[in-house]
Amino acid sequence: MNTKPTPEAIATLRTLTTSEQFEVITDAMMGEEGDHFIEIIDRIHATWQAMPKTYETDGQGCSALARLHYFIGGCDWWIVEKDADPDHAGQIQAFGIADLGMGPEAGYISIPELLENGAELDLYFTPKRMGELHD
């Protein structure tokens, strides 16, 4: 029998996915493969909670771990750090690598902007070192 993810895990999923992707995932968790999708929601929440905040991977260079992946068309974004959000106004940016089809480049990434433009969170991404993303 399916158990529900915590409200915090659902809130994290809502923050990290488009409204369309969120709806598909939350609908799927009510179906016959619900346990699988609940595990995905819980894993994404745990990954987000454990993700380093801004500047916490400073100096790690190519060994810093990209923990989330977004994609749309031929474009990819890998998230290494989340914004520290000291004023609790919401996660407004992240640090990672963007590849818009011209090769990977490190920099700051706006997750809300990615979502506004239809980028999807890769539910099956396995974390990789930044150095592996340059290949």
Image (cartoon, rainbow, N blue to C red):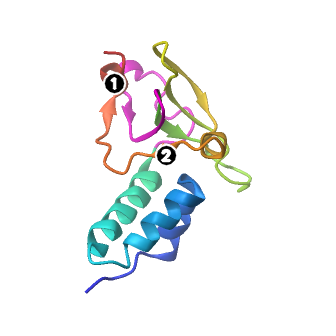
Image position of 129 with respect to 23: above or below: above
User: Tag 1: residue type?
Assistant: Ser
> In the image, what residue occupies the spot 38% across and 28% down?
64
> In the image, what residue occupies the spot 30% across and 83% down?
2
How crowded pointer 1 is (Cα within 10 Å; few <14, some 14-19, many 20+) is rated as few
Image position of 35 with respect to 105: above or below: below
Image: magenta residue range: 52-74
Picture coordinates of residue 76, whole percent (x, y): 46, 30
- Where disc 2 sits, the SS reads strand
Q: In the picture, residue 68 is in which quadrant?
A: top left
- Where disc 1 sits, the SS reads helix
**Seen in the image, is 135 located left or right of residue 95?**
left
Picture coordinates of residue 89, whole percent (x, y): 74, 54
**Seen in the image, is 75 located left or right of residue 1?**
right
Q: Which of 73 and 68 lies nearest the eye of the viewer?
A: 73
Q: In the picture, residue 128 is in which quadrant?
A: top left
How crowded pointer 2 is (Cα within 10 Å; few <14, some 14-19, many 20+) is rated as many
Is the residue under label 2 in contact with that under label 1 (CB below 8 Å)?
no
The N terminus is located in which quarter?
Answer: bottom left
Question: Is 38 contained in the magenta span?
Answer: no
The C terminus is located in which quarter?
Answer: top left
User: Tag 2: residue type?
Assistant: Glu
Residue situated furthest bottom in the rendering: 1
Residue situated furthest front in the rendering: 73
Mark 2 sits on what residue? 120
Mark 1 sits on what residue? 63
